[in-house]
Amino acid sequence: MISSIAGEHSANMEILSTSTLLLIVCLIFLILSITHARKHQSKGRLPPGPTPLPIIGNILQLNGKDLFKSLNKLSEKYGPVYTIHMGMEKVVILCSCDAVKEALIDKADDFSARGRMPLLERISSGGHGVVSSNGERWKQLRRFSLMTLRNFRMGKKSIEERIQEEAYFLTEEFRKTNCQSVNPNFYFAKAVSNVICSVVFGSRFEYGDKRFLQLLALLHESLRSFSSILGQMYNVFPKVVEKIPGPHQKSFKAVHDIHKFIEERVKMHKETLNPGSPRDFIDCFLLKMEQEKDVLQTEFHMQGIVHTTFDLFSAGTESVSTTLRYGLLILLKHADVEERIHKEIDHVIGRNRAPCMEDRSRMPYMDAVIHEIQRFIDLAPLGVPHKVTCDVHFRDFIIPKDTTVYTMLGSVLRDPKQFKYPNEFKPEHFLDENGKFRMNDGYMPFSSGKRICLGVGLAKMELFLFFTTILQNFTLKSLVDPQDLDLKPKMSGFGKVPPSYELCFLPR
């Protein structure tokens, strides 16, 4: 009996001591957490924001189907600069043209780093390439890429001539439809992709090339998945979502397959490389790799060439092709705008020669329409996240070093201080009282500052030449009453996906 009591007492003491130990560990952990939080707070005075829940932060206050709308709504309560918790990470949100310009232009160096975005980190193998990288790696890759795109003319054809050629092939494809209705999605993807393919790979693909079509399908799959709800959740809880089946897993596989394709092209280029006559971006990168083969910390290696080429290929294909198909949908709804464009084209260019970039200065209405299309569709409403490179005094706050910052480009493009009718399609936003083209400070579809889109010049050239060539040759016909056309995107996450539609191309 006594031994039984003694045993029970001993067991109770053991349980008590274990419980006490656990309690002590929990208290120590709590003290360390509070100390860390206070230490972090002492470094900065972050803007106010909604109160977060433990672990999940403010996720329940965000609509996964329209993340921008949720964040913009919060700015109505907390102002143009506020803090939100994406899970356990504190993120500063900038809404309004003034706030974004102050960060990206007035304090360009302070906001020049790439912010934390696990999806980008995952597909860039931890920050390779020019989009996801930071520090010296980013500086070297961006400088090299800009210099190559600006100065390299790839043989006897200029980039403008390559776009003109592709615009001709595209119009011939539309002519083959014989006025029958078509979905323009893959037509634009093939044409636009061929432009960037000629720049990075040295040649275009035939529109029926199976490998080319597979490549475009992979790219479309990956970018569509990244805007899905699970894709957005990956950026908040990557370790959890990584283990969940869903569309994001297919997108990772798609990106991997595109990387494999690029690796194959790099190997082909190595075998046929002529150092005295580089043919394209890959050749130039290979020559730079050879120059720096003995440099220990070089950024010009196999991972660098694959990921930088992927960045150029993906961004150069999707953004322009999406703008083109969204733009035609808008013109279908606004027949008066299309009619006015036709008159300007006939007056400046006529029907017998191909449009060229010199025409743009004499076509203010066409220029204004393209700028307004980009503003209205707001293709990347959240932009790509930035990160501050040091403790930054911003307005009445202090943003600690390495804090992720979302510069809400959509809030700039629809800022009522910049645009009289922010939610309506009005080319007049970019025209003065005399009908001449006028730039607006709120035009920021390519972002701004140090991280402005690498291919902004190429994209602007493509948009003008493709839009003008199409409308020089065709009148657009909707299958439904234009008033019934819905311009709302069918998906709006980190990027917008326009609604599917069909139209007829009627030769002029």
Image: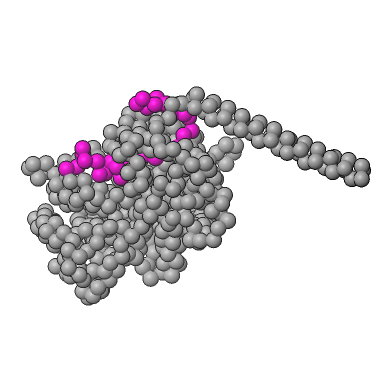
Camera-nearest residue between 226 and 271: 226
| Residue 192 visible in the snapshot | no
Camera-nearest residue between 79 and 206: 79
Identify which residue is drawn at 47% across, 29% down: 400
Q: Residue 154: image x %, image y %?
A: 37, 51
Q: Residue 436: image x %, image y %?
A: 11, 43
Identify which residue is drawn at 43% across, 57% down: 228
Q: Quadrant of the C terminus?
A: bottom left
Asked which quadrant contains residue 417, the reply is top left
Q: Residue 175: image x %, image y %?
A: 23, 71
Identify which residue is drawn at 21% across, 71% down: 479
Q: Residue furthest front?
A: 1
Asked which quadrant contains residue 182, the reply is bottom left
Image side of residue 351 versus residue 61, left or right: left
Asked which quadrant contains residue 329, the reply is bottom left
Q: How is the image coloured?
A: one colour
Identify which residue is drawn at 19% across, 51% down: 424
- With respect to residue 316, does 432 lie above or below? above
Camera-nearest residue between 497 and 347: 497
What are the residue bounds of the magenta stretch? 391-420
- With respect to residue 206, does 244 lie above or below? above
